[in-house]
C-alpha cells in the first residue's frame, strides 16, 4: 500500500480521507469528503531531549495519553 506524502509528515494512526455522498432531505446526492481531524501539537521527547512539533490526528492524542508519553507511543505502537 502506498502512502500519501501527508501521512509521511505526521502521525495519522491509519486515518485517511474518505469519500462518499451527502444526502439531503430531498434525497439529492452530492459528493463530499470526510477529512481526519488533524491538529498541530508539540510533544516533549525524553529520549531526544527536545520538543517535537508535528501534525497529528485527535485519535493519536488520546493514544499518546494512554501510553503515558510520546516516546512510549513511538516505541510501543506498530507502524501503520
Image (cartoon, rainbow, N blue to C red):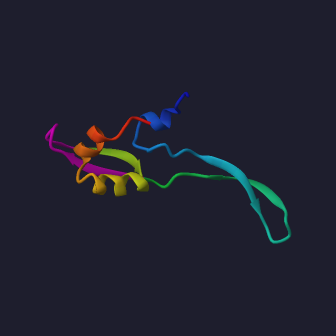
Percent position of residue 20, x then y: 71, 51
Task: Give residue 46's quadrant in the image.
Answer: top left
Left or right: residue 34 compared with residue 69: right
Say which quadrant the N terminus sits in: top right
Say which quadrant the C terminus sits in: top left
Q: Is residue 11 above or below residue 34?
A: above
Q: Main secondary structure of the magenta part?
A: strand
Q: Which residues are magenta?
A: 39-51
Within the magenta stretch, is there residue 74? Answer: no
Which residue shows up at 35% across the image and 53% down it? 63
Within the magenta stretch, is there residue 47? Answer: yes
Which residue shows up at 84% across the image and 62% down it? 28
Report the front residue among 19 and 62.
62
Percent position of residue 52, x then y: 26, 43
Which residue shows up at 55% across the image and 27% down it? 2
Which residue shows up at 43% across the image and 33% down it? 8
Left or right: residue 70 compared with residue 28: left
How many numbered tags mark residues here? 0
Percent position of residue 17, x then y: 59, 46
Left or right: residue 13 compared with residue 19: left
Q: Is residue 75 above or below residue 28?
A: above
Report the front residue among 23 and 67.
67
- For this orientation, the residue located farthest to the bottom is 25
Percent position of residue 11, x then y: 40, 43
Amino acid at each position: 500500500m502506498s502512502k500519501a506524502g501527508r501521512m509521511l509528515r505526521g502521525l495519522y494512526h491509519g486515518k485517511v480521507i474518505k469519500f462518499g455522498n451527502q444526502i439531503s432531505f430531498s434525497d439529492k446526492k452530492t459528493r463530499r469528503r470526510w477529512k481526519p481531524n488533524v491538529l498541530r501539537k508539540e510533544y516533549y521527547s525524553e529520549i531526544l531531549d527536545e520538543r517535537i512539533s508535528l501534525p497529528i490526528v485527535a485519535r493519536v492524542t488520546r493514544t499518546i495519553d494512554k501510553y503515558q508519553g510520546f516516546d512510549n507511543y513511538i516505541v510501543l505502537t506498530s507502524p501503520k
